Amino acid sequence: MNKFSAISDWVLLFAFAAAVYSMPIWLEPLGADYPDLMQRFAIFGLFAIGYNILFGLTGYLSFGHAAFLGIGSYTAVWSFKLLTMNVVPAIMFSMLVTALFAVVIGFISLRRSGIYFSILTLAFAQMSYKLAYSVLTPITNGETGLQLTLSDARVLDAAAGIEVTRSLPVTNFFGIKMSGMPGFYFCATVLVIGFFISLRIFRSPFGAMLRGIKSNQTRMAYTGLNTKPYLLWAFIISGMYAGVAGGLMAVTDPLAGAERMQWTASGEVVLMTILGGVGTLLGPFIGAAVIKYFENILSAYNTTSLTQVFDFVPEALQPIVVDVVSLFVGSGWHLTLGLMFMITVIFLPGGIMEGVRRIGSIFSRKKPTAAITSTPSASENASGA
Amino acid sequence: MENTVLHVADVHKSFAGLHALSDIDLSVREGETHAIIGPNGAGKSTLLNVCIGRLKPDSGHVVFDGENLTGKQPHEINQLGVVRVFQTPEIFPELSLLENVMIPILAKRDGSFKLRWFRRFSSEKTARIEAEHLLSDLGMETLIRTDAGSLSRGDKRRLELAMGLAQKPRLLLLDEPTAGMARHDTNATIELLKRIKAGGMTKVIIEHDMHVVFSLADRISVLAGGRIICQGTPEEVKNDPRVKEAYLGEEQV
């Protein structure tokens, strides 16, 4: 970690910010430059970056982070209903309320490690999901999902003299409406801040301790470190990221449903992190963007559009080709995701970031750790297995 | 009597009916190097594990500098200044040597928990300089940025020693510090431990290698069958008939 200087970190941060803010430009050729999708890139990117602080640094695999996503969403919608349509308090509350939940869930789950920790977090998330559907209906509005209504109190807005008459109010950032591109820029800004904090944590003594826990937790204890508070803080911080991501979902679309907390959503962030590269700074964001991009592209296909695509195939074969391919697109796009995931994990265990590193080492040949690595092992790394 | 730093009083420990330790009474004086020797299975490692809180004694207690260590968490015992160097190298394989040594230094300086998430690890100058000094003292200055997992076994053991020394312990417990080392590495380690001894650090050392024991120890306790059968200066122990009996057919003392 010491080979990264403070300057190179600032360069990385600015490059990241530039890449995020310029998404509308460079995503155009990919057909992904519309606000709704780019918002999702930013939101799920933030979710994965936060998740990586726990999973990537400490190695603790949580299967329940979607619970925090849901809690963040509900909190934000309640803030819109009760206080104001301004998004800043909504995000703040999402963060704080999620942190409270993370303290409790983390405190209990972290009494165990390994698979038992994963199961405990999964149990908590499923519990939250079921509760949101049943007992907590007064708070969550059950199956319908929590929505804005015309009769909402909106105390702060009312005090400021903002009246709602005919149509539902829109979320705003001090007057700027948070739909479309402004919504994207708001999410992007939160993402960049989130990336900056993650960068600081990665490079800090705190981050080093978390890495030590991942590497050899027993040794940490015999080195005089109490691993419990370190783990709990990592858990809370990553929970807060998820809460903010959930809040942002409500910002871009003020509606919260329990399905956001389901275990499949928890699993998705694990896939994103692993696909991009566990424990890397950029990997989780890249993984999130790749998954959301393919989800968007592939789930849009149906039999009719596939027939058009495979127009060049001889007519006799066309139905077969369409039938086979249609398994992998539309609602079956998860099959493609599964294949993508398998291929990545088998050939690039370090995720997409490992691929980037390998390509980088082929081109640069500078061998960053050349002074100590002997030549044969360096070339082994480059050619890969 | 000089100041007793570590006092093991009346410790019993049994595993499923097997008496691993019985009636252990042991006093370690300030600044001395106390060796614990004994045939295989005598209970040496168990005794050390009881001292650092890895195992709880069935009865009796371990007192370090007036503090009862029994029932304390491993990290609390470490924070009191009792540091153990393990027999099988316990290091952080995925981290660089520098990080491996800096973590114990920071643990000593900042206590068992400190949330320093905004500061840069690499700008912890004093800790880094200290770690670099230690590593070059042990002849590993060229390996500072290597991942610890790629070291040879002997180097891993030296790294672990560095991690222990980095905490400037008041009591250092060494579990066979030279096992698995080549002869010249063993001698280098003995030299290093002698230098530390000159600095006045109290040490308890478990060792099979009598060459190492007799070049370092001020006093020796001999464990056999879970009991201390003899305690004294190296000269006394060498000439004690009970010791010869315990080691008969095992090793020439």
Image: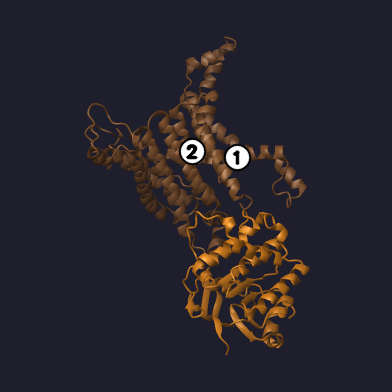
Question: Is A375 situated above or below B229?
Answer: above
Chain A as rendered: colour: brown
Residue A297, percent across and down? 50, 25
Q: Name the residue nearer the viewer: A184 or B101.
A: A184
Q: Name the residue nearer the viewer: A361 or B231.
A: A361
Q: Is residue A137 left or right of residue A187?
A: left
Structural crowding at the residue carrying mark 1, measured as other residues with C-alpha within 10 Å and reported as few (<14), some (14–19) or many (≥20): many
Badge 1 marks a residue whose secondary structure is helix
Question: Is B109 situated above or below B230?
Answer: above
> Disc number at residue A353?
1
Tag 2–tag 1 contact (CB < 8 Å) = no
Q: In this figure, which residue is indicated by the disc labeled 2?
A: A45
Q: Which chain is orange?
A: B
Structural crowding at the residue carrying mark 2, measured as other residues with C-alpha within 10 Å and reported as few (<14), some (14–19) or many (≥20): many
Residue B38, percent across and down? 66, 77
Q: Mark 2, chain letter?
A: A
Residue B65, percent across and down? 51, 80
Residue A194, percent across and down? 47, 44
- Which amino acid does the dot numbered 1 rest on? Met
The reply to whether label 2 and label 1 mark residues of one chain is: yes
- Please give the name of the residue rendered at 71% of the width and 45% of the height, measured from the top-left corner: A367
- Which amino acid does the dot numbered 2 rest on? Gly
Q: Name the residue nearer the viewer: A373 or A174.
A: A174
Badge 2 marks a residue whose secondary structure is helix
Q: Quadrant of residue A259?
A: top left
